[in-house]
Image (tube, helix red, strand yellow):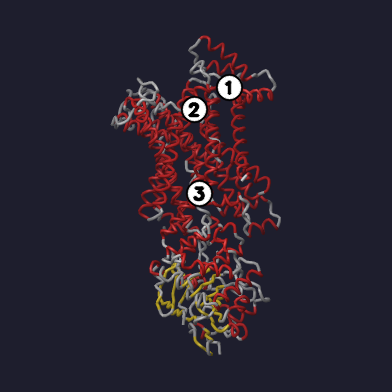
Amino acid sequence: MTAAQPLPDPTTAPEEPAVATPKAPRLEALYFALRNPKLVVGLSIVLLFLLVGLVVPPFLEHTPGERYAPPLLPPSAEHWFGTTQFGQDLFTQFVYGIRSTFLVGFLGGGIAAVIGMTIGFVAGYKGGWIDEVLNMLTNVVLVLPTLAVLFIIAAYVDSYGVVTQSFFIGMTSWPWAARAVRSQALSLSSRDFVDLARLSGVRPWKIIVRDIAPNMSSYLFMTFILLFGGAVLAAAGLDFVGLGPNDGMSLGLIMHQAVKWGALQLGVWWWFVPPGLGITAIVGSMYVMNVGLDEVFNPKLREM
Amino acid sequence: MTLEVSDLRVYYRTLRGDVRALDGPTFTVADGEIMGLAGESGSGKSTLSKSLIRLDGRMRYIGGSVTLDGDEMPIWDDRAMDEFRYKRVSIIPQYAMSAMNPTRKIGKMIAELLESRGVRFRDVRDELHRRLELVELERDVLDRYPLELSGGMKQRTVMVISTLLNPSLLIADEVTSALDVSTQRAVAETLVEFRDREFVKSMIVVTHDISLVYQIADTIMVMYGGRLAEKASAKTIIEMPKHPYTKMLLDSLPEVGVKYEDKRLSGIPGSPPGLLNPPQGCRFRDRCPLADKQCLEQPPFVEVESDHHVACWKAE
Amino acid sequence: MRKYFGRKIFVYALTFFAAVTINWMIPRLMPGDPIKSRLARASLNDAGAAEALYGYFNKMFGLDLPLWQQYLNFWVSLFQGDLGISIWNFPTPVIDLILGAVPYSLGLLLPSIILSWLVGNWFGAYAARSKWLDNTILPIGYILTATPYMWLALLLAWSLGIVAGLFPAAGSYGLSLQPAFTWTFISSLLEHWFLPFLSLFLVALGGWAIGMRNMIIYELESEYSNYLQALGAPRRLIRKYAFRNAMLPQLTGLAVQLGTVVAGALLTEIVFSYQGLGYLILQAIQNQDFFLLQGTFLFIVIGVLIANFIIDIVYALVDPRVRVQMQGGAK
């Protein structure tokens, strides 16, 4: 989780030389996007995994939990990723696991993004005591060790699904996004065009949605990607200690079972290597993709 | 002549081609001259002032020469320029309020800067104290952090730092734009005093405020669309301008002290030309009431009277 | 001074209050009779344990009392250091188990946090030097931060521990040893400590390197850097300033990341069966030992709060801006 890394500051985006003719920024962004290896490689890997998670499951003959094969087979043409101690096919588990990884990422990251952005925007735009209170709330949740809180919550819930898990993760991982968005909104809300809107009596929500948010859309998108990665890692941690959803399969759960049934001692590397590699590849590619996006949106970085 | 600029071309490289931000101005700044540099945004004035000390990342040197006290400055070579910077050409930046490292005491920062340029701090300390006194700053600002100084104090401190090594040429880049009116006047007067005391030999004052330039400058140079429009003594420019653009610029000033930049000039219809594919001929032609066929050809920047240069076919 | 720390302490107090309240509230929010369902699921080896526990649960939860009374009682027993009795390790008080585990967790956390922060910052500053370094260090950094803590721990335990046999892959010290101040014990302790430490250190390293790299680029583009460049100052001086100024937000980042690193330590301990708080949490979860789980949670929160406060103090010491503001010298 990379909450500490600063995102580029859209409010100090470099000024184009004033002499430049009116241009099409979207086209220019696309031009750079297609020529940015970090973005292209990162996005390709993410899409590949997403595709596997979406398309492959219907073609699989067995369910992830089904015990039908000989136990502890190493990877082979028959079982690409080998089998578990109970004769479950690890490739099947992996593919279903990718599915829930993306689900948790989108839902958990999405919920965190919505909460963080709402609180950040309102605090930054409204200021005054509302800002004080929201800031306090943000700081409190920020200091709480997220995963430990999730342990407590998940331990008491008897059974729950991926959606609930995403909800819990989203509810606890928004603070740094709120902070980041707040400081951006703060500097944007003192700009002329926002002042003008405010003077002409436009309602605050409209100003935020119409004037402030579009000006930092690239920033918000990158924030979401970081939250997505954080949610995936948090879910993997929960699943790994055995507090994951009771239904379905996840990459963290595969690792949990591997450790629980002694894969480490038995040297059954194919049980725990692929799931972790999958998470690292997905989250890592998203982060690298983010750097690429950053370079596309922030021309100053292109020269580096 | 302190500064001789000849056919200087500096472009911005963009995807759609070169933006000809500075397209071949030729002019000189005499010893002891304070030259005001005026123009709308996009006129090339800030590109010119940056070119004389440090090109920023996207500017590309295309051609032309800059000579300071008879030595050619290698403005295309960032490293070689270091020898000239500070010692021979210096700048008071537009962002003087935030020009100092916020986490260093001011005195320490100055010492480190000087030592890194091979100047011993001990040797200039007394002079530094004298100059701080001159701008009415206590010596103990050196023991403070920038945060502890007011805006005006920071401005004056930066002025002293920038001129400490007695450069031949000082570029004052919009130094007054962030200040209130009374401070603006004080800053302007300090600039003149620095010249009179020979802390600096010559000066280029880039500014929004043509009335302020008029108070302190010996000469005024007006730029338009990356080229020079007119240069003459301050008095001549204000009282007897020859370039139609200068005339309109002055006419459009409602009263003294009003800034004319940022927004399009109300008095002049149209807007400055894009410099990606600038129109052929005189770049002011689209907005000029006097324009005719002759203006399809670029007018040369010529001396029409003694020390009065204009680039316009219609200037008699 | 008073305002800076006053504010911080207020937030921390509020956080602690929130953590305790969460702890109190969650069992009560769950449907059904929490005591019965907990007891039914608890794996009790001791016959007397069930009875003792039932009484204890009743006293602790006091469900027949009004809510505010229950809440108040919860706080009172907390301040008496009473976190309940462990079910997993009946009848050891939870607090004793936790105090026994804390040194192991701290022994892992402190060196890995501090070293990864220092080394990561150094790498990050180095990466900002050239395109080539940037293109090497940055992707490695991103891969490391994207690595789940437990996965790297598994890889190290398997490769260096089990396959290569260089280090023990499980436990905190040799099984045949008793804690003592002997060379055999200490060397065994260090041997067992190394892999979990390395694992934590590596994952945390990436984040710091990336953070520093981004901060330093930001600083190099700042106005004071521009001014120095215009005055011909050498890159060395400008980098020095940028590095120092970039360290300050990295210090704040340390506070923000603390929770993540602690969580990472818990997961790493579980992989290595290292007997810190993470191991306790795993036992608590597997044995449905809720007193232990909640007690450990509170301790983690307290630890994170203390660490945050220490970082605040250090920050105030190193950032002149905070110092100046505290002296009221700002205008």
Q: Look at label 1 and name its amino acid.
A: Asp
Looking at the image, is C5 positioned above or below residue A215?
above
Please state which of residues C260 and A202 is positioned toward the viewer in this rendering: C260
Residue with the mark numbered 2: A243
Task: Please name the residue shown 55% across and 29% down the image.
Answer: C298
Q: Which circle marks residue C45 in the picture?
A: none
Distance from the alpha carbon under mark 2 to that under mark 3: 37 Å
Q: Which circle marks residue C248 in the picture?
A: 3
The answer, for residue B37, to whether it is visible in the render is yes
Distance from the alpha carbon under mark 3 to that under mark 1: 39 Å
**Which circle's residue, 3 or 1, is located before the other in the chain?**
1
Task: Please name the residue shown 65% across and 25% down the image.
Answer: C71
Q: Is residue B78 left or right of residue B198?
A: left
Q: Look at label 2 and name its amino acid.
A: Leu
The answer, for residue B249, to whether it is visible in the render is no
Please state which of residues A273 and C138 is positioned toward the viewer in this rendering: C138
Q: Position of residue B208 (x, y in %)?
A: 59, 72
Looking at the image, is A294 positioned above or below residue C19?
below
Chain ID of residue with mark 1 = C
Q: Position of residue C230 (x, y in %)?
A: 47, 66
Element carrying mark 1? loop
Q: Look at label 3 and name its amino acid.
A: Leu
Q: Is residue C14 left or right of residue B81?
A: right
Residue with the mark numbered 1: C82
